[in-house]
Every structure is written in C-alpha cells, then in structure tokens.
Image (cartoon, grey):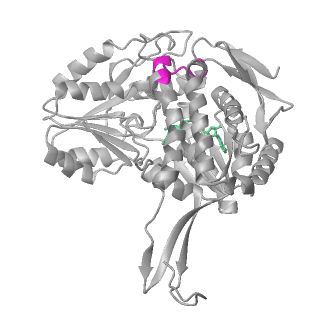
Amino acid sequence: MTTVTVAGVEVDTRHFIGGQRVSSAETFADHSPIDGAHLADIARGGRNEVDAAVTAARAAFPGWAATTPAQRAEIMHRIADIVERRLEELAIVETTDNGALLRSHRRGVMPRVAHNFRFFADYLINDLHHEPFETRGHTNIVSWDPAGVTALITPWNAPLMLATWKIAPALASGDTVILKPAEWTPLTASIFADITVEAGLPAGVFNLVQGYGEEAGAALVAHSGISRISFTGSVPTAKLVARAAAENLTPCSFELGGKSPTIIFDDSDLDLAVTLATEQYDNAGQVCLAGTRLLVHETIAPQFKEAFAERVSRIKQGDPRDEATDMGPQIHPEHLERIDGFVQRARESGADIVFGGNRAGADNLYYQPTLIHPRTPSDEIVCEEVFGPVLTMQTFSSDEEAVHMANGTEFGLAAVVATGDRARAERVTKQLVAGTIWVNCFFVRDLRAPFGGSRKSGVGREGGTWSFDFYSDVKNTVFSPNGWKDGAAHG
Ligand code: NAD
C-alpha cells in the first residue's frame, strides 16, 4: 500500500526523491501513542535510497542555487500559504502520530511551520546583508553563497516544526535538502513533500528519505556528497553523527538535549513562578528546552511547593485530540520505560518522590507529572535528561549558590529565572551558561534570535543571520581601488 488514510488525511508512505515517490523493499510500522493503533507501514530506506536522494539533490543544486532570492522567497511564501490552508490536516495527523496536544498544533506549532518559511523568505530579501567596509581604500563585500546539499536529521517531539525550522533557511540559502525524519513520527514530513510539489518547488530541491536512524540516518550523514548536516536530537546520537561527518569534514549544526534550571528567587511573583514551573511539563515533558531542575530559594520553598502541587493537580491528562486536555501520552512504549526507569532508580536510591512517580494507567503511555527531591546534586535524576514529565526540586540560600547549582551540569541549553528584582536578573543572567535565558517568561521565541546550546547542548547557533551563516558558504570579496580600465575606484 503506497498511501494510508490517517485521521481522514491521505498520507503517502513512500520516500520522495527527485520529485518522485519511491518505494523500498522493506517497511517499518508506525503506531499512534494515543491508543497504540497501527497507522502505517512506512518505506524503510537505507544506503540505496540515500545515494539516490544525494544524486537527485546534487543534480537539482545548480538550478536552485541560480534562482534569485525573490524567486526562492516566492516559492517559500507559497509553501507557507499551503501549510496554512492545510493546517487542520497537518495538526490532526501530527497529534495522531506523536501524541502532542491538538490545540497546540492548531494554535502554536503549525502556524509556526508556516512562519518558518515566511520568516526566512522575508529575512533573505530584507535583512541579509553586511555593510561593505574599507581596508586601506579596498572594499570588502560579504556575501552568502549556496553551499550544496544539506542533510537534515530531526526528532519526534515536534516533527514538522523542527524539520521546517531547518528546511526553510536551507532553501532560502539556495541549498537543496534531504530530510530524514524520526522513525516514530514519519507522517507530516510526507505531507510536506506533497506541499512542496503544489508550491512549485523544482524536483530534487527537497527530498525525503524515511527510515531508521542507524540505517537511513547513518548512511546520510556519512555520505561524501553532502555539504551540511543539521541535526536535532540526543547527545549520544550527535556523537555518532560527528564521527561520521569527520570523515568528510562536513560542517555540522547540533541542537541537542538539556537539563536546564528554573531558578525561583524569594522576591519573585509566586503565582508567576508556579505558572513557569508548571509549563516545564508542556508536551508531557518532551521539550528540549524545559527547565526541569527547579531551584527554589529556601525561604519560599514550602509555600512554593504547596502552590505548585495544587496547580499540577489541576493538569488534565487525556486524549490529546480533546481541546480540554493539558497533557497527552509519551511518544512510545520504549520511551515510557526509559522515563519510568529514571524515576524508579531515583526512588530506590532514597530520593523523595513529592508527587507523581508512576504511570498514569496500566495499558497506555501516560505518565504522572512528577516532582522529586533528589538526595544529592550528583544524583542521576539531577544530572541526566529524562525527557518526560519529571522535575527535580532543590533549594538554595544565596544568588551565588543559585548560579553555582544552575551551572552545575554538562548541558547549557536554556534557563528560566523568576525574580522581581531587575538588577538581580541582570547580574544572575550574565553568569548563567545557556543558549537562551527567559526571565519571568518561558518559550518566547523570535526567529531573529540565535538559538542553540552551550556545552553538550549543542554546537553552533541557528536563527536569523546565524542560520544563513551555517547553510551558506560565506564569502568575502575584496575590490582594489586600482587596476580598473575606466580608472574609477570600485565602491
Ligand atoms: P535521537 O538522537 O534518538 O534521534 C534523533 C534523530 O537521529 C532521529 O531522526 C533518528 O532516527 C536519528 N538517528 C539515530 N541514530 C542515528 C545515526 N546513527 N545516524 C544518523 N541519524 C541517527 O533523539 P530523539 O529521541 O529523536 O529526540 C530526543 C532528543 O532530542 C532529546 O535529547 C532532546 O532534548 C533533543 N531535542 C533537542 C532540541 C533542540 O533544539 N536542542 C529540540 C528537540 C529535541
């Protein structure tokens, strides 16, 4: 079967290579985390499909690279138009495939998919420039040239949003693209391939290879025919990708995991602090940026904990397609096991499970929102990314101690700070190691801003000019004032 109907939407189960749908001899099964329903048997790509995709993307590259920014922007805006027209279909298929809230997909995630294309199209036209500068009368001109074929490897927690956050700047830069989405959430990427056709993107400019990470993903990142790798996923996989990329010296951008702090000072608005802490359970805790280590000033810890427990008790778990649901299931049985393993090991080691700490049902993928008082700062539950609805809470007694605890991790993706004191906010944020810091807010994202992680949370930054810097060959051309036939200095 080459197409399936998921939540009333037709989805092609094949790869998309050189403008054609392509089958594989083997398939892999895709299930819904909501009820375990079998959704599709998806083409299982490997080296052959990757080779074909690289050949197609390389063949399409000169033509796409030669288009003007205005031509690229026009097609990208058409993609955004179609995403907006098909928003409801994309939202319901994504929810069915990854279990995240339908209301978030409708109102936040899919609008952001469209915005990814509009933003980078407009940025290319209006903002991407560098003022020429002089060196002893010579003029330096900086330009961003298309780099070649970009390989994109993406995770399952926000599949289409995270893929298009990379596809859009790569296309805007004049690169051609091969996407290998996560095997637990292959569906919306396939709908996206149809959208590129309708938008008039030339064949071979966008290619999709479905399959397992160890097969299709590994073959793609090891390929000598690609010029960029942008990867979002876990640290262990990033190390494998980096090793494969090293063979060809392929430049990589890594957006990885985190164990970010949410620091709550004693001068913070308690109600706001409780809201910020509760938001760390968003998407059933499957958010890389989540501030999962609550660090609370000791003088307000008891009242914070009481108010927080009360607020969390109001979180409504259930079917993510229901508008009233606040928290859906975890993505996959394997992932649920992993989350529960962290919690049970913490329990066994003597940590205090303040609330939650168990599955929310015997035969489903729901997990209770959980809060843990660790025994020591070096406990596994404090140091390792759980990627589920599991927070830890520790107390501090001074700003210095808060900063020390916040930075006491091998990650550096984000930090959330709650304080009523602007001077304290400025002082503390300067000392925090993180790619993004939110003060008295969470998840406010502007695509002009740099996005990425410090330490093991990533390599490089994307967003605004940083995306173009990565997906392009940045070039400096120096014009001498001398040697011109017309005698006029260049400038
Ligand atoms: P993962 O590392 O297991 O998989 C990510 C992708 O890599 C998948 O498409 C997978 O198929 C592929 N892959 C696996 N092995 C591969 C290999 N050998 N070669 C090439 N590709 C391979 O991560 P996941 O479980 O899908 O996602 C969760 C992780 O992603 C968490 O650590 C989370 O924090 C992180 N994440 C980070 C960000 C960010 O922007 N920093 C955003 C979302 C998720």
- Residue span colored magenta: 94-106
Q: Residue at x 50, y 46 (%)?
A: 122
Q: How far from the left and from the top, in percent, is residue 39?
A: 69, 17
Q: As displayed, is residue 309 above or below residue 261?
A: above
| The one of 323 and 157 positioned closer to us in this rendering | 323
Q: Is residue 364 above or below residue 216?
A: above
Secondary structure character of the magenta stretch overall: helix
View extreme (right): residue = 25
Q: Nearer the viewer, residue 420 or 120?
A: 120
Count of numbered marks: 0
User: Looking at the rendering, in which quadrant would you find the N terminus?
Assistant: top right
Residue shown at the point (65%, 36%) measured from the top left? 181
Inspect the magenta stretch and tell me whether residue 101 lies in it: yes
Q: In the rendered image, is residue 459 in sight?
A: no
| Residue farthest to the front, as pictured | 486
At which x and y percent is residue 425?
20, 45
**Is any part of residue 235 visible from this angle?**
yes
- Where, by quadrant of the figure, is residue 79 drawn? top right
Residue 386 image point, x, y percent: 46, 32
Q: Is 74 situated above or below 197?
A: below
Is residue 416 rendered to the left or right of residue 366? left
Please state if 19 lies on the left or on the right of 443 as rendered.
right
Instruction: Point out residue 297 in the picture as x, y percentages from the top left corner.
Output: 18, 35
Q: Quadrant of ligand 1?
A: top right
Q: Any magenta on residue 491?
A: no
Quarter of the figure with residue 474: bottom right
Residue positioned 60% across, 29% down in the render: 82
